[in-house]
C-alpha cells in the first residue's frame, strides 16, 4: 500500500515518500499537535499475515523506544492502523553515508563517522539490542555532519516468519550480513553488527566493497567462503594497523573479531597499545646522598685505610639518607672525595651478585624456553587468523613450543599468483605445513617426507590474504624450523 501526500496515518499527515527497501517504505510526515516533521517507517504489508508479529512488534518496539543516544534516531511512536504497522522517529534530512561512498576517504574523516557509530552500537548492545541491518543507507547524516543510526532492530521485528521470504528479507542487506548469519544462524549477536561496520569502514577507506556483487546469493556465499581482499594487495596502501584492524573486524568467525565495536574503531585509529614505551624521557635525577653517622657496631676499615676517629669515640657506621638500594656508584664526586675508594672487588660486589643471578636466570630461560612454549629461541608467531604474522616472500624462522603449538603466517597476494612454500626442519623432529584460506579451507598440505622438507603449492584465483600453517608432525614434538616462501 502506498500512502499519498495529504493522507492521514494515526496522528500524522503524510507529506511525501522519501524511500523504500526490504524493511518497508519511509515517509516524511507532519505532526500537527507538536508542529514538527517526523519520519514514518511503514512495515511491509506481509507482516499482517504473521500470527506472532503483534507480540514481536510490541516487545522489540519497547526495547528500541528505550534507547536514548545522540547517534541513534529517537523513536517517538510505534503503532498499527488496520493492517499497517508503522514506526515514527525523528526526521533527519542531511542525506546518508551512502551518498559519500565510491572513492577512498581520509582516515581522519572516516573516524569522525565511525567513532560515534561505535559508541551508539556498544550502548545498544549493552542493553540487549542488536541492530541487525547496518549499512550506509541506515547511517543518516545531519546538516552538521553528525551520523545517526536508524532502523534499529527492524530485521528482528519483521523476522523470517513474517510472510516475507528469507531471500526477500535479505535482498537489501546481503552485502552486509555476517558469515554466521549467511550460514543460517538463528541469532545475530553484537559481533554481526561489528562485521557490518567493518564492511562500511572498508568501503570508506578502500573505496569499494570487499565483495562486490549484484546477486544476493553470490554476496552471501562470498561472506562465508571468500578471503577478504587485502587493501595493499589491490593497490590501496593503508597503515599496517588500519589494514590489520579491517581484516580482524571482517574475520569469518565471530570469536576472532574484536570484543566490542568500539575496540575495532580504536584499533583503526591507532596501533595496538602494546608497543614498547618511549625511551626519550630522561631518567629522574637521584638526589645526592648525605653521609651521616649513627651509633652502631664498630666499623671495619680496610688495611689501606687509617681509622677515621680516636678509639675513645663511640663506635659508629656510615649510613645514607637515600634509598638503601643505592650503590656507591650513585654518589656525587663531592661525597666520594671525602673517603678513599674501597678495593674494586668490594665496591662492585653488590652489583656483581645480582648480575650473576640475572645471567643464570636468562640462561635457564633460554635452555628451558621450548618446553615452556615462550618462543625464546626465536620469535614465535600467532596461532589464530587474527594474530597471524604478516610476511612477504623470503625465508622466515620459527619455533614450535610448547608441544601442540601451531604457527600461522599471513601472505597477501594478487589474483592468479602462484604460492610455493617449503618447510625446512631445524631441531623440530617432524613437521606439517598447510596453505589455507581465512575461513580454514585447506588449499594444499603436506608432512615432511623427503630430506626433512615439506612443500605446498597453490595458484590463487582471487587477490587477498592466504595463510601458512606450520605444526609438528607429533603432538609431543617441539623445535625450530624455517619456511621459504616464493610467489610469482
Image (cartoon, rainbow, N blue to C red):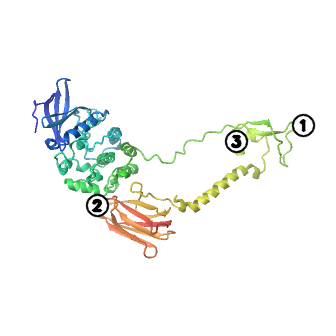
The numbered dot on residue 312 is 1
**Would you identify the image quadrant in which residue 293 lies?**
top right
Q: Tell me which corner region of the image, top left, top right, bottom left or bottom right, holds residue 421.
A: bottom left
Cα–Cα span, label 2 and label 3: 65 Å
Compared to 298, does 243 lie above or below? below
Image quarter of the C terminus = bottom left
* N-terminal-most mark, 3 or 1: 1
Asked if one can make out residue 98 in the rendered structure from this viewpoint, the answer is no
- CA neighbours of label 1 inside 10 A, class few (<14), some (14 to 19), many (20+): few
Q: Is residue 451 above or below residue 378?
A: below
Q: Which residue is disc 3 drawn over?
A: 324
Work out how far the residue at label 2 is from the one at label 1, CA to CA, in angstroms: 94 Å
The image position of residue 106, as x and y in percent, is 33, 43
Q: Position of residue 23 (x, y in %)?
A: 19, 42
Decide: marks 2, 3 in contact (CB < 8 A)? no
Q: Which residue is mark 2?
A: 462
Looking at marks 2 and 3 on the same chain, the residue that comes earlier in the sequence is marked by 3
Question: How many other residues sit within 10 Å of disc 3, few (<14), some (14-19) or many (≥20)?
Answer: few
Residue 75 makes an appearance in the image: yes
Secondary structure beneath dot 2 equals: loop
The quarter of the picture where residue 221 lies is bottom left
Amino acid at each position: 500500500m502506498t500512502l499519498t501526500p495529504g493522507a492521514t496515518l494515526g496522528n500524522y499527515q503524510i507529506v511525501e515518500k522519501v524511500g523504500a527497501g526490504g524493511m518497508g517504505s519511509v515517509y516524511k510526515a507532519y505532526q500537527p499537535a507538536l508542529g514538527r516533521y517526523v519520519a514514518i517507517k511503514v512495515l511491509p504489508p506481509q507482516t499482517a499475515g504473521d500470527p506472532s508479529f503483534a507480540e514481536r512488534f510490541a516487545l522489540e518496539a519497547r526495547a528500541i523506544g528505550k534507547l536514548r543516544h545522540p547517534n541513534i534516531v529517537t523513536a517517538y511512536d510505534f503503532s498499527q492502523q488496520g493492517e499497517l504497522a508503522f514506526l515514527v522517529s525523528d526526521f533527519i534530512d542531511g542525506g546518508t553515508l551512502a551518498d559519500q561512498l565510491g572513492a577512498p576517504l581520509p582516515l581522519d574523516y572516516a573516524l569522525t563517522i565511525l567513532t560515534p557509530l561505535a559508541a551508539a552500537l556498544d550502548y545498544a548492545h549493552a542493553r540487549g539490542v542488536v541492530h541487525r541491518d547496518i549499512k550506509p543507507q541506515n547511517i543518516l547524516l545531519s546538516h552538521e555532519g553528525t551520523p545517526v543510526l536508524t532502523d534499529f532492530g527492524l530485521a528482528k521485528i519483521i523476522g523470517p516468519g513474517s510472510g516475507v521470504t528469507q531471500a526477500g528479507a535479505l535482498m537489501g542487506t546481503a552485502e552486509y550480513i555476517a558469515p554466521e548469519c549467511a550460514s543460517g544462524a538463528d541469532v545475530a549477536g553484537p559481533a554481526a553488527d561489528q562485521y557490518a561496520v567493518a564492511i562500511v569502514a572498508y568501503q570508506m577507506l578502500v573505496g569499494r566493497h570487499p565483495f562486490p556483487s549484484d546477486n544476493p546469493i553470490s554476496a552471501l556465499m562470498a561472506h562465508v567462503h571468500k578471503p577478504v581482499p587485502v587493501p595493499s594487495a589491490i593497490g590501496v596502501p593503508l597503515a599496517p594497523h588500519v589494514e590489520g584492524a579491517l581484516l580482524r573486524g571482517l574475520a569469518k568467525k565471530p570469536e576472532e573479531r574484536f570484543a566490542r565495536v568500539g575496540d575495532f574503531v580504536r584499533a583503526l585509529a591507532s596501533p595496538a597499545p602494546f608497543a614498547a614505551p618511549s625511551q626519550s624521557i630522561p631518567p629522574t635525577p637521584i638526589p645526592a646522598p648525605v653521609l651521616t653517622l649513627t651509633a652502631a657496631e664498630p666499623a671495619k676499615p680496610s688495611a689501606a685505610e687509617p681509622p677515621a676517629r680516636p678509639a675513645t669515640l663511640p663506635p659508629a657506621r656510615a649510613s645514607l639518607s637515600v634509598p638503601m638500594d643505592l650503590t656507591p656508584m650513585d654518589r656525587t664526586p663531592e661525597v666520594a672525595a671525602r673517603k678513599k675508594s674501597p678495593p674494586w672487588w668490594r665496591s662492585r660486589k653488590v652489583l656483581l651478585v645480582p648480575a650473576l643471578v640475572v645471567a643464570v636466570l636468562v640462561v635457564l630461560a633460554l635452555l628451558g624456553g621450548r618446553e615452556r612454549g615462550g618462543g625464546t629461541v626465536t620469535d614465535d608467531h600467532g596461532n589464530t587468523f587474527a594474530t597471524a604474522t604478516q610476511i612477504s616472500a623470503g625465508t622466515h624462522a620459527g619455533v614450535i613450543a610448547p608441544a601442540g603449538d601451531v604457527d600461522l603466517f599471513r601472505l597477501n597476494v594478487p589474483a592468479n599468483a602462484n604460492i610455493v612454500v617449503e618447510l625446512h626442519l631445524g631441531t623440530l623432529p617432524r613437521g606439517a605445513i598447510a596453505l589455507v584460506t581465512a575461513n580454514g579451507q585447506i588449499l594444499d598440505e603436506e608432512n615432511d617426507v623427503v630430506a626433512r622438507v615439506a612443500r605446498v603449492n597453490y595458484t590463487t584465483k582471487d587477490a587477498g590474504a592466504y595463510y601458512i600453517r606450520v605444526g609438528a608432525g607429533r603432538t609431543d614434538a617441539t623445535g625450530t624450523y624455517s619456511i621459504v616462501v616464493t610467489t610469482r
